Amino acid sequence: MAERNGNYRVGCVGAGFAASVYHLPVQQRVEGVETVAIADLDLDLARQRADEYGIPEVYGPFEEMIEQADLDIVSVCVPPFLHLAVTKAAAAAGVHVICEKPMAASPEEVAELVQVVEDSGIKFMIAENFWWYPDLVDAKQRIDAGLIGDLFHVRVEEFINDIDPTYRRDQERFLMYEQDVHYIDVIRHLVDADVVRVHAMTRQIATQQLAGENFAMITMEFDNGVIARIDECWVSARGDQYVMRMRIDGTIGSIFINQPDHPYKLYTDKPGLEGWHYPPTDTKPPGGHTVGYSAPWPADELREGTVGCYMAFLDYLDNGIPPVTVASDNAKTMEVVFAAYESAETQQVIHL
């Protein structure tokens, strides 16, 4: 792996939403990376991004970029059905990969991608920006410090009435695959245990033009006894469309994120610290952002999570410290996602 002027040379595959809102701006901000190439079959869009971000090399097929550009890292910002192919090409060239979620399109592709990473020796991580969302990083530290005791319950509620105008509108699997994968991964790492049972229900509420589900509920049981639930509705009434609440309950306290009265607060009965606490946070109360669509998580704050992803990846490259979202670990998240669809389709509890 070559280094130039202390920077890792990055080539971005894809010039669409994920690249323009998250990866390219963050690559400009993070010290130690330099975006030197971009590839997209829409060459006009690729050239537009290159002009916006000062990227010197523009390619059509990603294979050409990986073969011809002098790269250390590929950032994968294309739809998930292409993630395996891009990772294979990068692995063959000895180029490391930071990849958007979800990791791959099927259990078989997930398993093959994990094997490609292991066989090639490249470093690979999923850019799970929700896990590096600053308040969640802080919450995990407080959980590990015993501030709320032993976890027994985690709940996420999300209500939105807008679908982003990307390829995701046309996917037969939408909400659990593209959005709940975030929360499944975050909850797995907060709980620090394995999911053993999954029960899910989905609906397609016919007020939006999309191929997949826009309403879902998932219950997960972990091998340490924790129960987690995700209530997800992307077809809510417009009077209540910017809601994302997370509640984490332990035996001596609870953590609340994005509640209506405060963006981040916790209660504890730990001796000497009893009562309510309001940790410092840059998070704003839910109000929505508009970056081509609306959502309760402000884009600039999610971008901070992407900064965390890149910092963790550089730590992996420089010091060999694996981030939590390496391929073999994220495969467990994807197993839960696919189990949730199996549960919804069969109306059965799925045992992992």
Image (cartoon, helix red, strand yellow):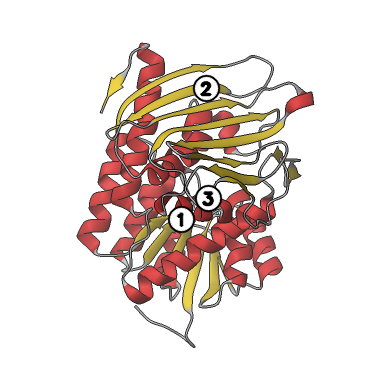
N-terminal of the pair, mark 2 or mark 1, is: 1
Q: Choose mark 2 or mark 3, whichever is in front.
A: 3
Question: Do residues under tags 2 and 1 come within 8 Å of each other at their CB atoms?
Answer: no
Whether 341 is drawn above or below 148: the answer is above
Question: Tag 1: residue type?
Answer: Gln
Q: Residue furthest bottom?
A: 5
Q: Residues within 10 Å of mark 3 (few under 14, many from 20)?
A: some
Identity of the residue drawn at 62% across and 59% down:
46
Whether 279 is drawn above or below 339: the answer is below
Which element is circle 2 on? Answer: strand
Which element is circle 3 on? Answer: helix
Can you give x and y, in whole percent of width and height, for residue 345 in the image?
Answer: 39, 15
N-terminal of the pair, mark 3 or mark 1, is: 3
Question: Tag 3: residue type?
Answer: Leu
Query: What distance separates the C-alpha of mark 3 from that of mark 1?
Result: 9 Å
Question: Tag 2: residue type?
Answer: Ala
Identity of the residue drawn at 63% across and 47% down:
264
The residue that label 1 is drawn on is 141
The residue that label 3 is drawn on is 136
Q: Residue furthest left?
A: 119
